[in-house]
Amino acid sequence: MSHPHPELTAPPPLPDGGVRVIPLGGLGEVGRNMAVIEHRGKLLVVDCGVLFPEEHHPGVDLILPDFSPIEDRLDDIVAIVLTHGHEDHIGAVPYLLRLKPDIPLVGSQLTLALIEAKLKEHKITPLTLGVREGGREELGPFDCEFVAVNHSIPDALAVFIRTSGGTILHTGDFKMDQLPLDGRITDLRAFARLGEEGVDLFMTDSTNAHVPGFTTPERQIAPAIERVFHTAERRIIVACFSSHVHRVQQVLDAAEESGRKVAMVGRSMIRNMGIAADLGYLRVPDGVLVDLNKLTKLPDEDQVLICTGSQGEPMAALSRMANGDHKIDVGEGDTVLLASSLIPGNENAVYRVINGLTRRGADVVHKENALVHVSGHASAGELLYCYNIVKPRNVLPVHGEWRHMVANGDLAVQTGVPRDNVVIAEDGVVVDLVDGRARISGAVDCGYVYVDGSLVGAADETMLKDRRILRDEGFVTIIVVRDSSTGAIAAGPEIQTRGFAEGEDVFERVQPKLVAALEEARRNGVQDTRQLQQVIRRTVGSFVGNKLRRRPMIIPIVVDA
């Protein structure tokens, strides 16, 4: 992904005592969050997450931050601070630790437990440092203080970074729910205290900056969930993020009250909720949670399933149920509850799942027809409170698309932050904090890194373009056998197609043109196989473009006999 300042070049050396922020993900997108902070020759990484692929990323499993700007400085990294346990903040940690496994991970109890379980699957045993709100740790030249923030996962933290060159308050993802289910509110008293000390750079969550007012409290969705449990005729299937402990807790509580049994479906859901229960973040009522095989033997009206797939992921449990490709056969009378918000870019995939479930006879309850999910991010009213409390000297909006970050910057200006002190940047744009002023100083190359099966970084935009062409336009193969002694056509051209509504007989019309083009090339002394392939590609491409209005992938094969 390019940054919005194409004229920028590599940044100059960081001035003595200055602090440099290099966002490698999360600016201009919702996901892939990662910021590198540099001071006195050392690096502190804040978060290291993944971005989930969209429809224009065929075959891609995950999208990682680009580590290339720091690959030759791995020994300078003093720690990776993880603000919370969502995939878009921790999911890329295994791929960074593959490069250097002994980089310490710093985070709260639940966050570290979730990343340790993930790293175990990658056969990596990390160095970890557990922290709590109110705690302080010296990490090289960075003095880090941790502040409790409320989010859609327990144990989230903001981090206040003190350096000799200035201070940075990074909120991570947060909101200001005043009646959270776990009683752990965003510590505005700490924000105010840090504001009194002086915040030189405020890096704050932008995701809901364009939404007026305040984010709905989690407690307000309980009636909608309870209504589903009271009215559902048969099974209830709940889809949510595999790390959404609060939502799973509400479902377990509703199941206990209605006398239903619950089973969890999906490896990540079972793993994460097991960790949350073991650490005391999830209260599992006695006798409510059962194995899936046991649940399916109960009457339908006693069954509740909690699964992943609320974002329409093709291989997730809910998508497979919608396609009839899962052992849970969703049908008439079943109720499906989608208890998650839509991640931007996933709308079409989610609606396909909703349509598939509805076609199978299920009653689908989702955000558009019931209050079954609330955001985990602060809306404009909450951000205004934070700006007025923190009173930052400079602002760098993070975690959001361009429109979100601009809206966040406008809020800062409304509260008195000078417009010149609000920096809107995207991934790769380098921001230096020197003498109390934050300024863009340059840019580093920073693109998408694709995880494609077992390969990391092998797929690139050219390959994805080829896949999109294959998916959308089909392909044509032309086989020509050439007499190696005379250069004349000995057999063919034989044309084979895939992905065309038109029959292959349509291509009979291009064969005389192909023969004529190849004969002309022979008369002109063209013997090189690659040049002949280009002749074939141009001839067929022109025919398909003009006659069929298509731009397929064309694969010419020239064989000498």
Image: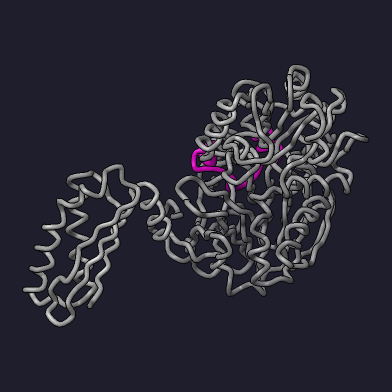
Q: In the rendered image of this protein, does residue 278 appear above or below residue 305?
A: below
In the displayed structure image, the side of residue 257 where residue 122 appears, left or right: left
Q: Position of residue 380 (x, y in %)?
A: 61, 31
Question: Does 330 appear above or below 9?
Answer: above
Q: Residue at x 81, y 52 (%)?
A: 108
Residues rendered magenta in the picture: 383-407
Q: Residue furthest right?
A: 286
What residue do we see at 85% from left, 37% from top? 289
Q: Residue furthest front?
A: 491
Q: Is residue 457 visible?
A: yes
- Above or below residue 287? Residue 533 is below
Tell me the quarter of the picture where residue 178 sits. top right
Residue that sits furthest to the bottom in the current view? 485
The image position of residue 239, as x and y in percent, is 68, 35
Q: Position of residue 213 (x, y in %)?
A: 63, 25
Q: Residue at x 81, y 35 (%)?
A: 295
Q: Quadrant of residue 525?
A: bottom left
Residue 349 drawn in magenta: no
Quadrant for residue 250, please give it.
Answer: top right
Instruction: Please name whichever residue, 333 or 196, is drawn nearer the observer in this view of the structure.
Output: 333
On screen, residue 199 versus residue 189, left or right, reads: left
Considering depth in this image, is 216 or 120 the residue closer to the camera? 120
77 sits left or right of 523 in the view: right
Q: Residue at x 61, y 53 (%)?
A: 50
